[in-house]
Amino acid sequence: MNVFNTLLSGVMGTSTMTLFSYAASEKEGQQFKEPILLHKLFRRALPFLPGKRSGRSARFDGWILHYIAGFLFSAAYDRIWNKTRVTPSIPAGMVLGAVSGLAGIAIWDLMFRMHPDPPKVNVKDYYKHLMAAHVVFGVFAALGYRAPEGVEKAVEVMEMEEEAELGI
């Protein structure tokens, strides 16, 4: 596993997906914010945990859970990119994102069904949103995975240009 690329992939994919979800929540006037929903599921399932139950700082657990999920998806992508002919590209990211969307919908559906007190969400709209959000995740996870390669190439080009200017 390429740990650095996988971590960068997870951060870029999860961050962009979350921005997409926050924007969609505002536009649609519905709750699509994964970290907040995860926080509510987590705290309602484990009410005995110490700490504040509300407020921005209390949502930290939802953010941690969301990024852990992103890293797990990115680790699966890393395995696919290193064990198959599939490369980290925008088209591959879209396909992997759609497959991840199906997995994500199944996981959320299971959590909502099994939870003793799930947050009120229009699941039909939320699941449609999750599919689109995971496609966003897949694309930006692929771009994040390739980012270090792009930086290396840019440095090589700059070094070649510098050497050419110096006549080396």
Image (cartoon, rainbow, N blue to C red):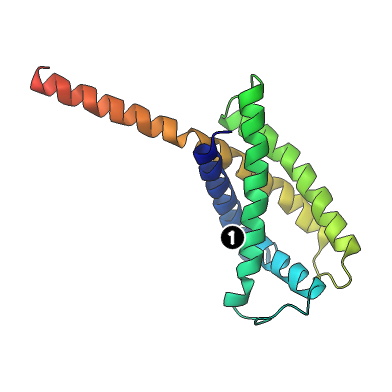
- Point out residue 148 in the picture as x, y percentages from the top left corner: 43, 35
Q: For the N terminus, give its image quadrant.
A: top right
Residue sitting at x 64%, y 39%: 75
Spot occupied by residue 55 in the image (x, y as percentages of width and height): 61, 80
Relative vertical location of residue 14 with respect to residue 30 in this rendering, above or below: above
Total tally of numbered discs in the picture: 1
Residue at x 85% of width, y 62% of height: 112
Residue 100: percent from the left, percent from the top?
73, 41
Q: Quadrant of residue 111?
A: bottom right
* Front one among 26 and 45: 45
Identify whether 135 is placed above or below 23.
above
Q: Quadrant of residue 6?
A: top right
Is residue 29 positioned above or below 108 on the image? Answer: below
> Which residue appears at 22% of the width and 26% of the height?
159
Q: Amino acid at mark 1?
A: Ala
Q: Which residue is found at the position 9% from the left and 22% from the top?
A: 166
Is residue 34 rendered to the left or right of residue 149?
right
- Which residue is disc 1 drawn over? 23
Q: Position of residue 161 (x, y in %)?
A: 20, 24
Q: Nearer the viewer, residue 21 or 141?
A: 141
Image position of 60 with respect to 54: above or below: above
